[in-house]
Amino acid sequence: MVVRGLFPLLALTFSLVSASPAARYSVKARQSITTLTTTQISAFEPYAFYASTGYCSPSTTIDWSCGANCEANPSFIPVASGGDGVDVQFWFVGFDPTLNTVIVSHQGTTVDTIIPVITDADFFLEPLDSSLFPGVSSGVEAHNGFAGDQADTATDVLAAVEETMAAHGATSVTTTGHSLGAALSLLDALYLSIQLPGTTVNYMGFGLPRVGNQAFANLIDATLPNRVAHVNNKEDPVPILPGTFVHPSGEKHIMDSNAWVACPGQDNPSDECSTGDVPTIFEGDLDDHDGPYDGVTMGC
């Protein structure tokens, strides 16, 4: 199902719907794209299940019993959860002894909900909250909706991560999510890196929209070097939005052939990567947003 004509809202400006950062990159960047092995692809699967689990409504006992996606990581030890799925996205924190990392995940949302959020005429870039991100320049800006949602749960998530690390002797944290959940988890990855110096923080996102400006993308690259991976599925239009924002490095793009490629740099313009493959939202396909990501389709 191609998006053409479905969302008049998306025609606000060409800058909103186009993958505009593409012009910045060199031929060398295009030539250094590599194909992931089956083993490398399989390493994303448990995180895809956690990203999908974020859609599930957590009970007071954190009973993940919504189905196969929520039961796919049976060794997971839940510690805390929150949100109401309406005003505040569901979130959860726990420990995966198989992966030997603390897991942080936020609820995603459907493609027909996330696109209007990203392109709403009322959105704007704003500096990160200095109380949550001390020392970060005011020139580092993020989508106000994403930043506000992350701020709503930040201190609770931090407390839960600290509790989990202490209980399990963990030194690694991995944040993950899909769609809106991917955006919130990227902000969490930066936040936790600042709040927990000495902790190895990794990020695994799926169907990630662009979260902030060039300075934000540069800060993510500098703070989490080679520890960010965001997976984009085929012609999913969400990862190219908003066109005026910039992705950090770390894109993995699932091709129409189902091969996965690693796209170096920020918003690599090759047609093997999202920015080049989906030059405008009108050439995207909404059905690709939920996956599958190595067989994992998002949603509870």
Image (cartoon, helix red, strand yellow):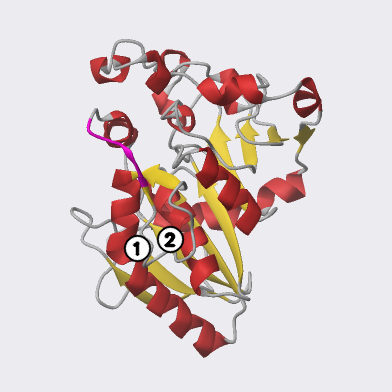
From mark 2 to mark 1, how far is it between C-alphas? Answer: 6 Å
Residue 22 in percent (x, y) is at 60, 22
| Residue 233 appears in view | yes
Q: Position of residue 5 (x, y in %)?
A: 30, 10
Q: Nearer the viewer, residue 134 or 190?
A: 134
**What is the span of residues highlighted in magenta in the rendered image?**
122-126
Q: Quadrant of residue 193?
A: bottom right
User: Compared to 24, does 174 lie above or below?
Assistant: below
Using the rendered view, name the quadrant where residue 157 is placed.
bottom left
Give the residue at mark 2.
105
Q: Marks 1 and 2: in contact by CB < 8 Å?
A: yes
Direction from residue 267 to residue 131 in the image, left or right: left
Label 1 CA crowd tier, 10 Å (few <14, some 14–19, many 20+) = many
Tell me which numbered mark, 2 or 1, is placed earlier along the sequence. 1
Specify the quadrant that holds the N terminus.
top left
Please indicate whether residue 17 sits to the left or right of residue 274 in the image: left
Most common secondary structure along the magenta stretch: loop
Identify the disc placed on residue 91: 1
The residue that appears at 39% across and 79% down in the rendered structure is: 159
Q: Amino acid at mark 2?
A: Ser
Which residue is more in the foreground, 61 or 207? 207
Residue at disc 1, secondary structure: strand
Q: Up-down: is 85 above or below 80? A: above
Q: How many marks?
A: 2
103 falls in the magenta region: no
Identified by mark 1, the residue type is Trp
